[in-house]
Amino acid sequence: MFKHLRDKLRTSDDDQEEQDEEIMVEENDSLTETNETPAPQSFPGELPLLPLRGVIIYPTMWLPITVGQPRSLRILEYMVSRDEKIIALAASKDPELEEPGPDDIYRVGTIARIHRMVRSPDGTVRLVLHGVERIRIDDYVAEDPFLKVAFTQIPDHEEHDLEEQALAASAKDLFAQLVSLSPQMPEEMESAARNVEGELQLAYLLASSAGFKLSDAQALLEADPLKGKLRLLNDLLRVEVEIRNLAQKIQQEAQGEMEKAQRDFYLHKQMEVIQRELGEENPQLEEINELEERIDAAGMPEEAEKEARRELERMRRIPIQAPEYSVIKTYLDWMVSLPWQGRTEDNLDIEHARHVLNEDHYGLEDIKDRILEFLAVRKLRQERKDDNPSDDLPVDYIRKDREGVILCFVGPPGVGKTSLGLSIARAMNRKFIRLALGGIRDEAEIRGFRRTYIGSMPGRIIQSLRRIESRNPVFMLDEVDKLGRDFRGDPASALLEVLDPEQNSDFRDHYLDVPFDLSEVFFITTANWLDPIPGPLRDRMEIIELSSYTERDKVEIAKGYLIPRQIRENSLRPAEISFDDEAICKIIREYTREAGVRTLERRIGAIARKVATRVAAGEAEPVHISADNLADWLGRPKFFDEAHEWIKAPGVATGLAWTPFGGQVLYIEATAMPGKGRLTLTGQLGNVMKESAMTALSYVRSAADRYDIPGQWFYQHDIHVHVPAGAQPKDGPSAGIAIATALLSLVTGHCVREGFAMTGEITLRGKVTRIGGVREKVLAAHRLGLTDVILPEHNEPDLEDVPEEVREQLTFHFARTVQDVWDVALCEEVIQPPPPGLNDNGETPESPDDVETPEAVNEPAV
């Protein structure tokens, strides 16, 4: 193959003998073709460097190139005067650079021997080069008048084992496939590759013939040993074969589609002629006429109707077999199916609405009042819309009809947020649609996908309105706090336009690209907590909080709603099953622990199913569920009163916490052991709670004199504070006074009084500051059977939110300082004396210098 290349070059040059001036001819007949790897040769340590643009020359390979750049021509002038025509070659990283510098050239290249130089009339010089050996450029000796480098030869490492032979055989097979798939590659190239026996020469031959991109070709040159080079060559050839296969498949499919489209076109034309002769209707014309009639009847706004008719005209001019025809048809189907004018008539009877809300839900008086207020405003607006506006306000301002109501129900799971939306729709005689937002991460789910994408469609807002066929439904956006966000956009930001009464009258879905009026939609959102909701979105909603149910509330809900519903769902009759109040209370206390009533309903449903099984088996005796036989139906209790168990020893205090699922009781334990004054916090505590614990410890140390605590005690002991339920993350500052009380109880031996729980943030000065979630925390203490609750003094007005029956069963203590807390919470007698303080030698230290001060808090134990 190489001889053929040289003969071709000679023939080309002989044709131009009259035009070209031959500068030098040096054909070393001893360099004949061979399959043996050439023996290593020695070369001078410094050589001129000729940068190559867009090409790599490998050892043993021949390469013709044309040189025309001035700096490269100076190299050739220099080489003419030398006996040994040896030159260093390396590829430029950017083929577009005219004169690449040292930083623009790869560090691994090839030594090559110049075998022929011919000058052309245009001033360029054509070279025939033969690669000899790989080199690594160590340094650039000179940059002017041309590049000159110091280098190190790096011969390829061969092992001549079976693995090399197998890799070479695999490369030959892949190259054969590549030649068969590439019309521009002659079959002689495959034959030449088959005849090469040396693995190294084969690797370089295939690399130079396959047409790899520059970076891959350079990687092959740099790869070492030969096995690594062959593995890389196999990978690159395999990718090229896959690309050629895919390109061939695409070409065949495209050709087949074009032939099919032409065939379909002729057949459709013949069918049209036949239909005209037979007097039959054109199906395309029928579709267009039907869509035109639906556009006329849809009652679209001017802009929407103009866009629909423009698309209809495009549809007339497109053949029915064209892909765009179905795209336009789908778009027009969406346009004519939307409820542009469809709405339901509101029932504004206030008494009817109050009856429906009371029938469906127990309690929730604040929310019911807000719904009735909304209905009252709409009723007055309709009754007085013809009244003259005030003289001191513009007429347009007074008569601007804006719904302006977007409610957000926030509360724990199971308190009736979602079902309340259904009741509102029934009270107003509106249709109801619910959209679950949990886990939505793509903004297009709200605004729709643009029509440029295949399979695009409107967003879920427009889809829901089309499905409900009304432009004024009660639209519930459920779990708005569970929205996600990623690289596809932020759905919460897309909701800003939907939930803004000033903007949603002109809502533009990306798919429709025309305005749709959402101002008549009654939007209701629900969330378990407010923190994940972005501030701008929260600002557009009226927040209504639904708190946890008390035990009395749950009993009434069970009797009035849950038990009758489970009787119906399990096909029972009311006479076949009954519950007494004690049984319901026991279910609430010992089989559920929740803010809502979902688990309570599941427990009642479990009993109802067991009764249904008995009835279906022929046992007709009525079943009465009491506290005594409850375990026979539900098994052993799932929850127990842990309060008394945790208050038996010093160093234990009961705190109160708020969670998105209702209030919770926290048991805080503290213990001490001989050490050097370190504080360890465990129980998956957040950073805020850790800082609160450090603040509590600092204040307890500052108050040591008041309780006759030895000054060295804190330097002689390590203190460990643990909050059980370690698998559950905890954070917040409201456990500050509980941690401080547990620490003082540990140090002094005074136990915390039985039945006491406390919540409040502590400062370094010992102040007790205001906290949130009072209602949830108090209800949690009441659920667990505690008797006394200590609250910050500034939270006393918040007790108005606590049901009266709960306030009557609890004793509240209000604290301004931590000292107020300790005066109330700690027993007077010492239950267990504090452990004595000794240093590492078993002696009492004489000064604080003998111990290590606690400067850091350990990470929570895993």
Image (cartoon, rainbow, N blue to C red):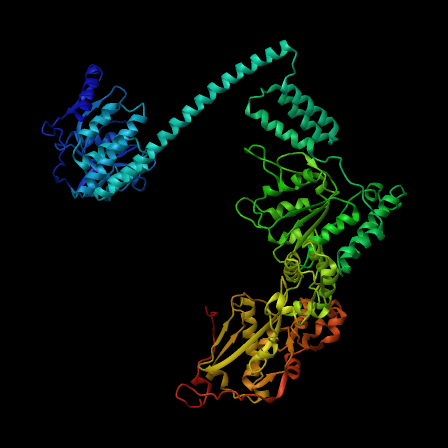
For residue 350, side relative to residue 471 (left or right):
right
Q: Position of residue 802 (x, y in %)?
A: 73, 68
Is residue 310 placed above or below 43 in the rendered structure? above
**Residue sticking out furthest to the top:** 277
Quadrant (top left, top right, bottom left, bottom right) of the C terminus: bottom left
In this rendered view, identify the residue nearer to me: 672 or 463: 463
From the top left corner, tell me how far across and down residue 511 is, in percent. 62, 35
Asked if residue 592 can be seen in this view, the reply is no
- Classify the position of the N terminus by image quarter: top left
Q: Quadrant of residue 630?
A: bottom right
Q: In this view, does 158 lie above or below 6?
A: below
Classify residue 756 as left or right of residue 797. left
Residue 387 in which image quadrant = top right
Name the foreground residue: 592 vs 58. 592
Q: Residue furthest left?
A: 30
Does residue 757 appear in the picture of this structure? yes
715 up-or-down from 330: above or below: below
What percent of the width, then of the height, locates residue 83? 12, 32
Q: How many marks?
A: 0
Task: Please tell me which residue is depicted at 11% across the width and 38% down the height of the picture.
Answer: 39
Residue located at (69% from left, 48% from top): 476
Quarter where residue 664 is shown: bottom right
Residue at figure coordinates x 62%, y 47% from the top left: 493
Residue at 28%, 31% (x, y): give it: 210
* Image position of 506 (left or right of 70): right
Give the x, y percent position of residue 671: 51, 80
Nearer the observer, 765 or 79: 765
